[in-house]
Amino acid sequence: MKDIKLNPKPMFYACVLEGLRKIAKENGYALAIHGSCASDLDLIAVRWNDTFSTPNELAKCFINELSNYAFDKSEFEELTTPEHRYKNQIHYTIPIIADWYIDLTVIED
């Protein structure tokens, strides 16, 4: 019998996605997935409205939502610092627990 490897990460990421999509929309962004979701959830947020929050505000809303799933909430926000990539991308790594995390890239004008 073949040994089957189970990976619960994609299922978890699928469950949190709808909440994050709503948050993005409320903040003036469209949200897209890229990647396999096998190890992390790679998201791209693109401004989709004339009225939008700053990338940091969007990331804080995501952090607030995802902190519901984190065990060590005291260090949750401290671990998430933006990294500027290229000239129009801000990248956030948002930890959830252990090696479960969200990679959020916000595209600016």
Image (cartoon, rainbow, N blue to C red):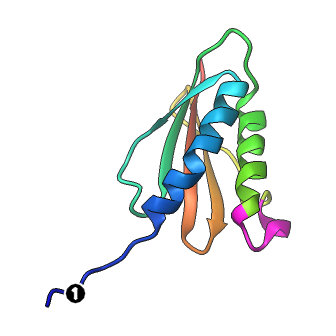
**Residue 101 within the segment the image draws in magenta:** no
Residue at the image position 68 percent from the left and 45 percent from the top? 82
Vertical arrangement, residue 17 with respect to residue 109, above or below: below
Vertical arrangement, residue 16 with respect to residue 75, above or below: above
Residue at the image position 41 percent from the left and 55 percent from the top? 37
In the rendered image, the quadrant that contains the N terminus is bottom left
Check disc 1: other Cα within 10 Å, few if <14, some if 14-19, many if 20+: few
- Residue to which mark 1 is pinned: 3
73 left or right, relative to 17:
right
Horizontal and vertical percent position of residue 54: 75, 27
Viewer-proximal residue, 7 or 29?
A: 7
Horizontal and vertical percent position of residue 64: 79, 50
4 left or right, relative to 46:
left
**Total count of labels:** 1
In the rendered image, the quadrant that contains the C terminus is top right
Viewer-proximal residue, 58 or 66?
A: 66
Say which element carries label 1: loop
- Residue lying at the far bottom in this picture: please name it: 1
- Residue lying at the far right in this picture: please name it: 74
Residue 33 falls in which quadrant of the image? top left
Residue at the image position 72 percent from the left and 35 percent from the top? 58
Viewer-proximal residue, 75 or 9?
A: 9
Residue at the image position 25 percent from the left and 81 percent from the top? 4
15 left or right, relative to 60:
left
Horizontal and vertical percent position of residue 98: 60, 75
Horizontal and vertical percent position of residue 29: 62, 24
**Residue 72 within the segment the image draws in magenta:** yes
Q: Which residues are magenta?
A: 69-76
Vertical arrangement, residue 73 with respect to residue 32, above or below: below
Kind of residue at disc 1: Asp
